[in-house]
Image: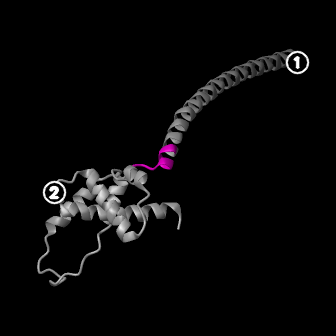
Amino acid sequence: MNRWSTIQQATNKFCGYLAQVEGMHPSGFNEQDKIGKAKVMFLDLEKKSFNFDHCWRVLRFHPKWVEHMDMVKPKKKPSSHDSTPNSINLGEYEDFNVASSNLERPIGRKAEKEKQKRKEMTNSDSLVVLNEMAEIRKSKLVLMQEARDHDNKMLCLRQEEVSLKQDELRIQK
């Protein structure tokens, strides 16, 4: 089992014990007392202490973790009543869907870096490309002007050649 699996499994169990303690609504308990009681439950039931306090403190308010904990359902205790209800309250499911659709998963570290890299490349690359295109246009205009000048010179030379030939023909007559 890798490191994250170990942390996740232990933290999930600790969160379950903490939820049980909070579900008891102990009178006079503050947040630290509840956490301490959950650690004692973890020690009693798991036969080892909860060593990932630092991880739990980081994870407990992150949207991904909160969403994950909402998805993980606690094990149900067997009940004496019929397991299929006669009526279903659709309002509960609507609220759940609305709440889960409002939570937007934050962008990951790799994706954020890639997005930033693409943005930087786009800005700098687009400037380079625009400058290159401007240079190409200038050189194209210069070449077109040179070609026009060359064509004009060739036209002048042909006109001179034609006039010389006409002069030669006149002389020969």
Identified at 53% across, 36% down, the residue is: 120
**Dot 2 alpha-carbon crowd within 10 angstroms: few under 14, some 14 to 19, many 20 or more:** few
User: Which comes before the other along the chain, label 1 or label 2?
Assistant: 2
For the residue pair 94 and 124, the one nearer the viewer reads as 94
Q: Residue at horizontal 53%, vertical 68%?
A: 1
Q: Is residue 25 above or below residue 106?
A: below
Residue 111 forms part of the magenta stretch? yes
* Foreground residue among 158 and 54: 54
Q: Is residue 162 left or right of residue 17?
A: right
Left or right of 111? Residue 80 is left
Which amino acid does the dot numbered 1 rest on?
Gln
User: Label 1 crowding class (10 Å Cα cut-off): few <14, some 14-19, many 20+?
Assistant: few
Question: As rendered, which of 125 and 32 lies closer to the eye?
Answer: 32
Does residue 18 sit above or below 155 in this rendering?
A: below
Please, what is the three-letter code of the amino acid marked with disc 2?
Ser
Q: Nearer the viewer, mark 1 or mark 2?
A: 2
**Pointer 2 residue:** 27
Q: Quadrant of residue 39?
A: bottom left
Q: Is residue 117 above or below residue 81?
A: above
Q: Residue 53 location in percent, x, y? A: 40, 54
x, y (%) of residue 110? 51, 49
Q: Main secondary structure of the magenta part?
A: helix
Circle 1 sits in a helix, a strand or a loop, which is it?
helix
Q: Which residue is mark 1?
A: 172
The answer to whether one can see residue 69 in this image is no
The magenta segment: 106-113
Residue located at (38% from left, 54% from top): 56
Does the magenta-highlighted stretch encompass residue 39? no
